[in-house]
Amino acid sequence: MDFLRDLAPDAGPVYQQIAEHLRAAIDSGRLEPGARVPGENDLIKRYGVARVTAREALGVLRNSGLVETVPKVGTFVRRFQPVYRYGSRRLRTERWTSGGTIQTAELGGRAHTTEVLFVGATAADERLSSLLEIRPGASVLRRSRRYRVEGKPVQLATSHLPGEIADGTPIAEPDPGPGGVYGRLREMGLSPERWVEELAVRMPTPEESRLLDLPTGNPVVTITRVAFTADDRPIEINDMTFDGTAYVFVYDLIND
């Protein structure tokens, strides 16, 4: 444990200092993915602290998504590598007109699955009617999914489309076919050409924590994306919730 530094007087709570020492070892690669992290007994011996202090230090790392604990085995540096989500590049037309999905193109060869949680009709509330520019109470099609990467749940997504567009079409099926929903919209002459995304960070709801298998204190990133046709007709709203430790969000900035 030569990568652990000594505690510094007046440098903040002891448990936070210990957590930062471990974080620095992880960030520098001295503790590699899958490596065992010093446990409570190791930290008690190294720093001469109480068990509750050692536990709090490890809790900071766990809540940051840096480590994972296997009961009765130990704590290890997290093996899961973050997904890089390219906000504008991922929506280029060739990504979904080739018959694949945006997720497939984005993840490359990483194993991933999509679970359909719900597909069905619902009524537009005030928010949906405003964003989709339809009357309140109008029929909308809801599509809710959960995405896993290498077995880990990383994202929830719920799309809403006007019922007059989607009802009775392959979009209303659990599997809308090659190219996904956007592929079907393109075939209908309603190809998405412009998107607006609103990103925020918050703590998850109990249901989100359950579906994403999040530890206590793990934040989520939410993105609401509205898709528009070439004539600026809003045709889809997608509310996405991401495990905040599983993604890196990248956006291209262009000087107009």
Image (tube, grey):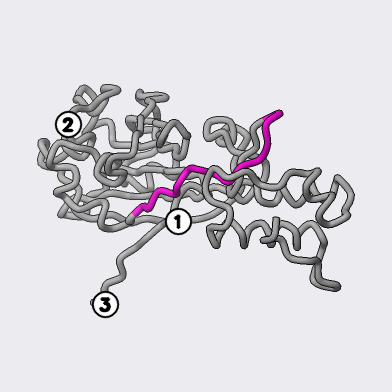
- Pointer 2 with pointer 3, Cβ within 8 A: no
Residue span colored magenta: 71-85
From mark 2 to mark 3, how far is it between C-alphas? 34 Å
Identify the residue under disc 2.
178
Q: Secondary structure at mark 1?
A: strand
Q: Does 90 sit left or right of 243 as displayed?
A: left
Q: Position of residue 110 (x, y in %)?
A: 33, 39
Task: Say whether disc 1 or disc 3 marks the residue closer to the N-terminus.
Answer: 1
- Which amino acid type is marked by label 2? Pro
Q: Residue at x 82, y 63 (%)?
A: 13
Task: Say whether disc 2 or disc 3 marks the residue closer to the N-terminus.
Answer: 2
Q: Quadrant of the N terminus?
A: bottom right
Q: Quadrant of the C terminus?
A: bottom left
Question: Toward the viewer: 141 or 171?
Answer: 171
Q: Does 65 sit left or right of 163 as displayed?
A: right
Asked if residue 145 is positioned above or below residue 8 in the image, the reply reads above
- Pointer 1 with pointer 2, Cβ within 8 A: no
Question: Toward the viewer: 217 or 38?
Answer: 38
Quarter holding residue 87: bottom left
Identify the residue under disc 3.
255
Identify the residue under disc 1.
199
Q: Position of residue 6 (x, y in %)?
A: 78, 66
Q: Which mark is residue 254?
A: none
Q: Secondary structure at mark 3?
A: loop
- Which amino acid type is marked by label 1? Leu
